[in-house]
Image (cartoon, rainbow, N blue to C red):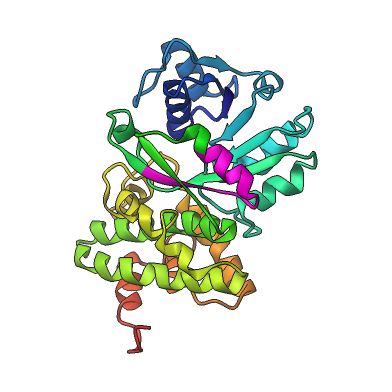
């Protein structure tokens, strides 16, 4: 099976490494002017892994789109512009898999919506979400993730192709819920990091309990299954996002309140803004997400905001 990975960062390079490990013919694509791509091309690896000799590194988008399956692992805010390039190539009957977690910031749109708005050719689309850290996967520490699509056949086909003892893939049944859940867990991850940075780690328990509640309300208001948040796409990813030293979003939150520099991509920052769009659109209260948004986007004091978040008026838990 020919597999191309669009994106040569931490997750993209891992997907290329993993796909080659399964015996697929793999090419990883990146922009020629990208330092990440240049380093991967030159060193055949990065700080996380070394690529098998069989994996090709390419900068020509038209060439990599000849693969049977195309995995996309780039920053969520760059998806629309990439799709505008993809649509210039013949990709009919190809299968695309969005291996990213986020929402379009200004519109609140899910990534599958963004993709479908731009790619007007008849293609198949799935998403791949759930817990998994490159640092652990390359050491053969197993994980479980989920594949989801509006087409059950595509869901099962993609899961079958990429399932292994290292990553057990489940069939998702709610594309909307999986996308919203996967994106929003990064916002909760930022909140967890802020609590760590403020030495309020004891509040991470309440954060874990209340986070899924508000996201489940939003998913239900949007027409999805509110129970999806309790699966792998959201709460199943909490350990890897709220507690792990590898989590970019948790580390960003901690660095932010400590006024320390953090240069890695934290998707939860843009997602928090997107969720405010959805909160207003669907009249769904998102207190945790709003707290993170007010801190990172409006500059409100973290300690005051987070403490007031957990000292709101008494109410029934459910």
Q: Position of residue 293 (x, y in %)?
A: 47, 64
Q: Nearer the viewer, residue 231 or 99?
A: 231
Q: Position of residue 290 (x, y in %)?
A: 47, 69
Which residues lie in the magenta part? 144-159
Determine the residue positioned at 32% across, 89% down.
Answer: 314
Q: Position of residue 163 (x, y in %)?
A: 44, 36
Query: Is residue 202 in view?
Result: yes
Left or right of 137 in this view: 76: right
Q: Quadrant of residue 70?
A: top right
Residue 148: say if magenta: yes
Left or right of 64 in this view: 146: left
Badge count: 0
Q: Position of residue 278 (x, y in %)?
A: 60, 67
Q: Is residue 202 above or below residue 77?
A: below
Q: Quadrant of the N terminus?
A: top right
Q: Quadrant of residue 44?
A: top left
Q: Is residue 241 above or below residue 22?
A: below
Determine the residue positioned at 66% across, 59% down.
Answer: 107
Left or right of 5 in this view: 187: left
Q: Quadrant of the C terminus?
A: bottom left
Determine the residue positioned at 59% across, 78% down.
Answer: 283
Residue 110: say if magenta: no
Q: Is residue 163 above or below residue 111?
A: above
Left or right of 155 in this view: 196: left
Query: Is residue 299 in view?
Result: no
């Amino acid at each position: 099976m020919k597999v191309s990975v669009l994106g040569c960062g931490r997750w993209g390079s891992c997907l290329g490494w993993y796909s080659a490990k399964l015996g697929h013919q793999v090419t990883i694509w990146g922009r020629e002017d990208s330092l990440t791509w240049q380093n991967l091309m030159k060193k055949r690896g990065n700080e996380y892994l070394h690529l098998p000799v069989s994996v090709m590194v390419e900068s020509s988008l038209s060439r990599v789109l000849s693969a049977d399956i195309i995995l996309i692992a780039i920053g969520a805010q760059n998806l629309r512009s990439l799709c505008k390039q993809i649509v210039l190539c013949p990709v009919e009957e190809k299968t695309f898999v969005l291996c990213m977690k986020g929402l379009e910031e200004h519109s609140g749109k899910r990534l599958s919506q963004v993709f479908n708005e731009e790619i007007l050719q008849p293609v198949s689309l799935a998403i791949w979400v759930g817990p998994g850290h490159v640092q652990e996967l390359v050491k053969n520490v197993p994980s479980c993730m989920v594949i989801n699509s509006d087409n059950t056949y595509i869901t099962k086909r993609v899961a079958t192709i990429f399932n292994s003892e290292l990553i057990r893939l489940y069939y998702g049944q709610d594309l909307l819920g999986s996308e919203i859940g996967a994106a929003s867990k990064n916002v909760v991850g930022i909140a967890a990091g802020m609590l760590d940075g403020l030495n309020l780690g004891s509040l991470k328990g309440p954060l874990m309990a209340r986070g899924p509640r508000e996201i489940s309300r939003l998913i239900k208001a949007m027409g999805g299954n509110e129970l999806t948040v309790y699966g792998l796409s959201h709460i199943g990813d909490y350990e890897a996002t709220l507690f792990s030293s590898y989590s970019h979003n948790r580390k960003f939150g901690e660095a932010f309140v400590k006024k320390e520099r953090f240069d890695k991509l934290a998707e939860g920052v843009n997602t928090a803004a997107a969720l405010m769009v959805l909160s207003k659109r669907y009249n769904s209260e998102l207190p945790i997400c709003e707290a993170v948004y007010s801190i990172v986007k409006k500059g409100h004091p973290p300690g005051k905001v987070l403490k007031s978040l957990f000292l709101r008026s008494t109410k029934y838990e459910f």
